């Protein structure tokens, strides 16, 4: 019964997808692919990535899959750590984005999704609820 309700919801969502959901060259519904990828990732959560980073949530918004990563630091601890390392906020964001692109593009399913026109975004949230980084992978 739950599967039937989920497939009806997905079917209704696909029927409401706009032109921006469809790949120009492949004629695929990228929004539908985003929802399918979101469902696959959701089954794996939570995922401990590093000592202080845990992927806890995933959602699909249009052609984008958004993954929330909880950082085991408060905002003030994050700022102090960044300052102590001598990295500017821009340098840190650039490094995280580069690492994230490498990670996304090395996973065949994720890389294929991005090549079809999808996007993968990570929201890095401190333990006190502040989003400190939100890089997006738009190409592999």
Image (cartoon, grey):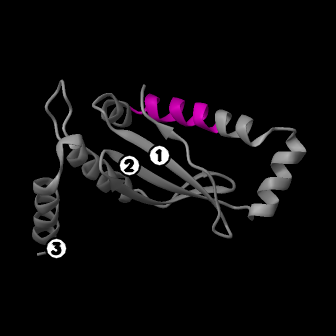
Residue 106 horizontal/vertical position (percent): 45, 29
Tell me if residue 39 comes above or below residue 97 in the rendering.
below
Q: Identify the residue position indicated by label 1 in the image.
A: 121
- Judge depth for marks 3 and 2 and give the one in front: 2
Tell me if residue 1 comes above or below residue 68 in the rendering.
below
- Kind of element beneath mark 1: strand
Chief secondary structure of the magenta portion: helix
Say which residue appears at 74% left-offset and 62% top-offset.
75
Earlier-in-chain disc, 3 versus 2: 3
Earlier-in-chain disc, 1 versus 3: 3
Question: Which residues fall within the magenta stretch?
Answer: 96-107
- Is 75 left, or right, of 57 in this rendering? right
Residue 111 horizontal/vertical position (percent): 37, 31
- Kind of element beneath mark 3: helix
Tell me, yes or no, whether the two marked residues, 1 and 2, touch with CB atoms within 8 Å: yes
Q: Identify the residue position indicated by label 3 in the image.
A: 2
Say which residue appears at 17% left-offset and 51% top-offset.
17
Say which residue appears at 22% left-offset and 43% top-offset.
21
Q: Identify the residue position indicated by label 2 in the image.
A: 65
- Judge depth for marks 1 and 3 and give the one in front: 1
């Amino acid at each position: 019964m739950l599967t039937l309700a989920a497939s009806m919801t997905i079917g209704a969502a696909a029927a409401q997808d706009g032109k921006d959901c469809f790949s120009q060259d492949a004629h695929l519904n990228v929004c539908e692919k985003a929802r399918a990828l979101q469902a696959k990732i959701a089954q794996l959560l939570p995922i401990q990535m590093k000592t202080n980073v845990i992927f806890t949530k995933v959602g699909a918004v249009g052609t984008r899959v958004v993954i929330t990563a909880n950082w085991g630091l408060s905002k003030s601890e994050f700022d102090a750590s960044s300052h102590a390392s001598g990295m500017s906020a821009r340098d840190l964001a650039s490094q995280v984005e580069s690492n994230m692109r490498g990670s996304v593009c090395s996973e065949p399913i994720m890389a294929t999704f991005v090549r079809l026109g999808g996007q993968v975004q990570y929201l890095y949230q401190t333990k006190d609820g502040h989003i400190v980084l939100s890089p997006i992978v738009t190409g592999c």
